[in-house]
Image (cartoon, grey):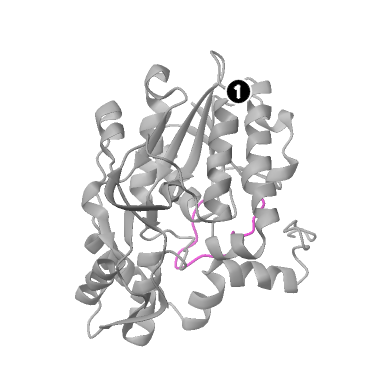
Amino acid sequence: MRVLITGHQGYLGTVMAQVLQEAGHDVTGLDSGLFVDCVLGTPPHDPPGIRVDLRDVSVEQLQGFDAVIHLAALSNDPLGALEPQITYDINHHASVRLARLAKDAGVRRFLYASTCSVYGSAGEDLVTESAPLRPLTPYAESKVRVEDDVANIADDSFSPVFLRNATAFGFSPRLRADIVLNNLVGHAVLTGEVRVLSDGTPWRPLVHARDIAAAFLLALEAPIGKVHCAAYNVGTESNNLTVAEIAESVVEVVPGAKLMITGETGADPRSYRVDFSAFRRALGFEARWTVPDGAAELYKEYISAGLTAEDFAKKFTRLPHLESLRAGGVLDESMRRITTDA
């Protein structure tokens, strides 16, 4: 298939583009390039790409594709809290506009990267796709709105599917350090401490970046009847862990690391355990990566690439990186690029 991936130069997109190309698909990317230089180690080989802000995509740029995989977003809760209107403009309004343009361009399949954080504070019980949605942040709220609005334009010619990913982890050539396992391993490598600022009790479902890519590949290649306008949780029940348990897995991997649960930020209201059986039944999806395996992978890559404290805190953490682009005159106040690469 001819597949367009939005956000192909991001953390997940860099991995997903490679996985789809290896599976034989003709991949093109679409990205504004905000994170193109956030590389740790060997630079990736990107597919051909279109450099454009998601808010400025035209119908002509979407013509000729069999599927759009929509990953691009401001994907960070602290950023969403700081700039909620920009988060809604990009993550909600521009995403729905993209889906409408894709439909107008004759694109049949639309795979949307949603999130398990739409369940918000769900307690101890495993939540299925039919559970009440209780988003607690602008980021999660924007995902709920997109699911609702895009579902309303589905028909026989336009088939969306909503993949609610668990919290991502694992190495990507374009690293993110502000997601829980990646962050804890980085701090352990750089400081010798695995520091948990909450009380460690909130539940988090985790899934490796490569498992997310495998899930999207399955949905892309599935008979349309199995995925049409469906929402699926993406992950595995064995990776439903408390933050304290995630931290303990890091201590076991990083030599000499010590666990410190400070509790200084108090209890985190974002706590949910997720049931992933629907996607397993529908398409046979099985996540392969455990959290300890991911921690070991990250430790190896961080050490091999010579991760530094400055890059960890600035280049690979979304909010400081975007603030530096603003300060450097690359982005305006609406997160639009105002300079072009040579």
Residue at (55%, 48%) from the top-left corner? 141
Report helix, strand or loop for mark 1. loop
| Membership of 42 in magenta stretch | yes
Residue at (45%, 32%) from the top-left corner? 25
Which contiguous range is marked in magenta? Answer: 31-45
Residue 4 seen in this snapshot: no
Q: Nearer the viewer, residue 288 or 174?
A: 288
Residue 150 rendering spot, x and y as whole percentages? 58, 30
Magenta region's main secondary structure? loop
Q: Nearer the viewer, residue 107 or 302?
A: 107
Q: Nearer the viewer, residue 313 or 264?
A: 264
In the rendered structure, the answer to whether residue 221 lies left or right of residue 152 reads left
Residue 211 rendering spot, x and y as whole percentages? 33, 46
Q: Residues within 10 Å of mark 1 (few under 14, many from 20)?
A: some
Residue at (31%, 71%) from the top-left corner? 200
Residue 181 rendering spot, x and y as whole percentages? 35, 66
In the rendered structure, the answer to whether residue 23 lies left or right of residue 58 reads left
Which residue ends up furthest to the top in the rendered image?
156
Residue at (41%, 25%) from the top-left corner? 227
Q: Nearer the viewer, residue 93 or 286?
A: 93
Residue 48 rendering spot, x and y as whole percentages? 59, 42
Relative to 252, residue 239 above or below: above
Q: Amino acid at mark 1?
A: Ile
Residue 151 seen in this snapshot: yes
Question: Which residue position is annotated with label 1?
Answer: 153
The quadrant the C terminus occupies is bottom right
